[in-house]
Image (cartoon, grey):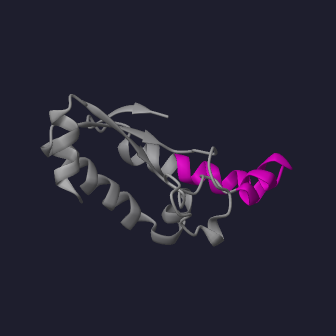
Amino acid sequence: VATAELDLARRLGFSTLRIFLHELFFYKEGDVFLQRVHRFLEVMKDAGLGAMLVLFDAVWRPDLEDAIPLPRTHNSAWVQCPSHTLLRAYGAGDAAAAERLQAYVEAVVGWFKHDARVLVWE
């Protein structure tokens, strides 16, 4: 964790930072993913910062498989969560897609629902 950036954010007057999560990492790592978020929240707390956990962010690149950074483009390798493929399946009524998203949300919210370091959910 880049604690220098967290310290800088605090010195600049930030009190809360948005933390963008991705369901793909949850499915790849399970509880390890949740433990990593927990550790990061601890580092943020030590820096005097609270967190806004963002579960979904479908506003950037949908091409998760080919997220190659683009020269001179801010956050060009940022990939939305969930992917367009998963969103299309969910929108088409695919029960497996709905279950996948529900399990992700329930796991993250269940783990951190009483965590005072999480100030806001998005």
Where residue 122 appears, as percent x and y from the top left, is 50, 34
Quarter residue 31 falls in? bottom left
Where residue 120 appears, as percent x and y from the top left, is 39, 30
**Would residue 23 appear left or right of 118 to someone viewing this image?**
right
Count every numbered label the image shows and give the total.
0
Q: Which residues are magenta?
A: 84-105
Is 30 placed above or below 44 here?
A: below
Look at the image and say whether residue 19 sits in the magenta stretch.
no
Q: Residue furthest right?
A: 92
**Would residue 67 appear left or right of 25 to someone viewing this image?**
right
Q: Nearer the viewer, residue 106 or 44?
A: 44
**Would residue 27 appear left or right of 117 to someone viewing this image?**
right
Look at the image and say whether residue 96 sits in the magenta stretch.
yes
**Would residue 105 appear left or right of 114 to someone viewing this image?**
right
Q: Residue at x 71, y 51 (%)?
A: 98
Q: Which quadrant holds the N terminus?
A: bottom left
Q: Nearer the viewer, residue 74 or 98?
A: 74
Quarter residue 116 falls in? top left
Where residue 70 appears, as percent x and y from the top left, is 56, 63
Q: Residue at x 13, y 45 (%)?
A: 46
Main SS, magenta residues: helix
Q: Nearer the viewer, residue 53 or 1?
A: 1
